[in-house]
Image (cartoon, grey):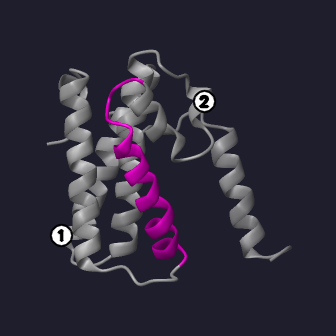
Amino acid sequence: MDDSYVEEALDTAEHAFQDTRGQTSETGLDVTEDSLVQLRKACRLLEAARTLRRRNGYYTVVIEASFVAIERSIQSFLLARGYTSPEDLRYGHTEVYDTAADVNLCSVEFPARLTQLWEQNRAEIYYREAPASAQQATAMLELAEAVHQYVLEFGSMAHECLCE
């Protein structure tokens, strides 16, 4: 790939992330509060998953976006309440579930089940060890929407949500 159009594309991508002056930010994510960024990322992920699900396909992407939306929804609550900092959230996907239990957002069993679902199924679907199905995509999207709604209600954050 060196010295080819692929390397040129890599150069362009690197530059796009290094020099952001004059770039148009995503609507709704142009906020400075870390908790709002995560909440609104969850909203955008859910909308993207809904759109793709309606197109009757893209099951793998719907499942992946749903898992990430769950993570972002919970992160938004933890950040809003000061239970964590943005730096704590950069690595590891399932630790946020345990933190949610530690602060009584959910029971201890709930994160264990989410982690098991993530570990056993997300990786298999993502790495194509198992094919994704319409039923799995629908179930994950419904779970992500339920977690998002619960976080909004529990954290009194609905007024900050971008979901329709």
Q: Nearer the viewer, mark 2 or mark 1?
A: 2
State the residue lying farthest toward the front. 109
Q: Give the alpha-carbon distance from disc 2 to disc 1, as whole Å.
A: 35 Å
Magenta stretch in the rendered image: 103-127
What amino acid is at disc 2?
Asp
Residue 56 shows up from this direction? yes
Report the residue at 33% width, 36% height from top. 107
Element class at badge 1: helix
CA neighbours of label 1 inside 10 A, class few (<14), some (14 to 19), many (20+): few
Residue matched to label 1: 54
Report the residue at 72% width, 72% height from top. 6
Q: Nearer the viewer, residue 48 or 4?
A: 48
State the residue lying farthest toward the right. 3
Report the residue at 51% width, 47% height from top. 94
In the picture, measured across the screen, residue 32 lies left or right of residue 158, that is: right
Quarter location, residue 60: bottom left
Q: Nearer the viewer, residue 89 or 56?
A: 89
Compared with 89, 36 (above or below) is above
Within the magenta stretch, is there residue 132?
Answer: no
Residue 33: x %, y % from top left = 43, 19
Residue matched to label 2: 88
User: Quadrant of the image for the N terminus?
Assistant: bottom right
What amino acid is at disc 1?
Arg
CA neighbours of label 2 inside 10 A, class few (<14), some (14 to 19), many (20+): few
Report the residue at 32% width, 46% height from top. 44
Main SS, magenta region, reads helix
Compared with 156, 30 (above or below) is below
Compared with 100, 34 (above or below) is above
